[in-house]
Image (cartoon, rainbow, N blue to C red):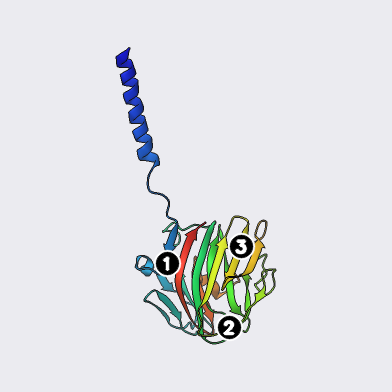
Amino acid sequence: MNSSIQSLGGRAAWLCLFFVLTHCGPAPRSEWKLLSDEFAPAWKASGMPEEGKVLIQDGEITLQSGQPMTGVRFDAWNSATLPLTRYAIEYEAMRVEGNDFFGTVTFPVNESHVSLIVGGWGGTLVGISSIDDMDAGENNTRGNAYFENNRWHKVRVEVRDDDLRAWINDKLFVNTSIKGHKLGLRSGDIEKCLPFGFASFATQSRIRGVLIRRL
């Protein structure tokens, strides 16, 4: 009888150890600093026609003015298993010269992609392109802000299951439901920023501090 109890006790101990070893591995990664040395090889010039020079150094991206656009993309989103929903994007962007969009970010939302336009249509438009085939200037995310050149502007985007939110300089500009809506990119060169990237239009811009954080 005692030997049977001891045998059962030993088996239970082994089962507990097996459970611990198989279920208590390292916690899922919660944030990614995309301009760190770890991810430096994953950044590439997007290859837009007549784009300006793309420089990546000292943890900062510089997009020289293109004719009209310049872009950069991050190729390792899928291979690094970054999230497709329930995540935040944080970065800072500066328009050095010009008067159109700068530091515009293109990013995944589940199986689709959209762009947050920062300073478009002559320098002030903010919004998401595209929702239900309507660009940022046409859908309900449209907003306006003044962007002073040679100043860093703080951007935060939140991708959730049913909605998108975006703040610029801590002011909420986008707060929209995406449930039941068609998401996509405006047709054209912005598609070269997939799966994640930045673009500028006839401007020189700088981007730094790109952080992805799981929500």
Q: Check residue 34 in the rendering and tell me which mark sits there, or answer none.
A: 1
Number of residues whose C-alpha sits closer than 10 Å to that of mark 2, classed few (under 14), some (14–19) or many (20 or more): many
**Residue tagged 2:** 100
| Above or below, comparing residue 96 to residue 129 in the picture | below
Q: Residue at x 70, y 68 (%)?
A: 140
What percent of the width, then of the height, locates residue 147? 58, 81
Of the two numbered discs 1 and 3 on the same chain, state the one appearing first in sequence. 1
Q: Residue at x 44, y 71 (%)?
A: 209
| Above or below, comparing residue 37 to residue 98 in the picture | above
Quote the CA–CA distance across marks 1 and 3: 21 Å
Foreground tag (2 vs 3): 3
**Residue tagged 3:** 164
What percent of the width, then of the height, locates residue 202? 54, 85
Q: Looking at the image, can residue 200 be seen?
A: yes
Query: Which of the two residues, 162 or 180, is positioned nearer the viewer here?
Result: 162
Quote the CA–CA distance across marks 2 and 1: 25 Å
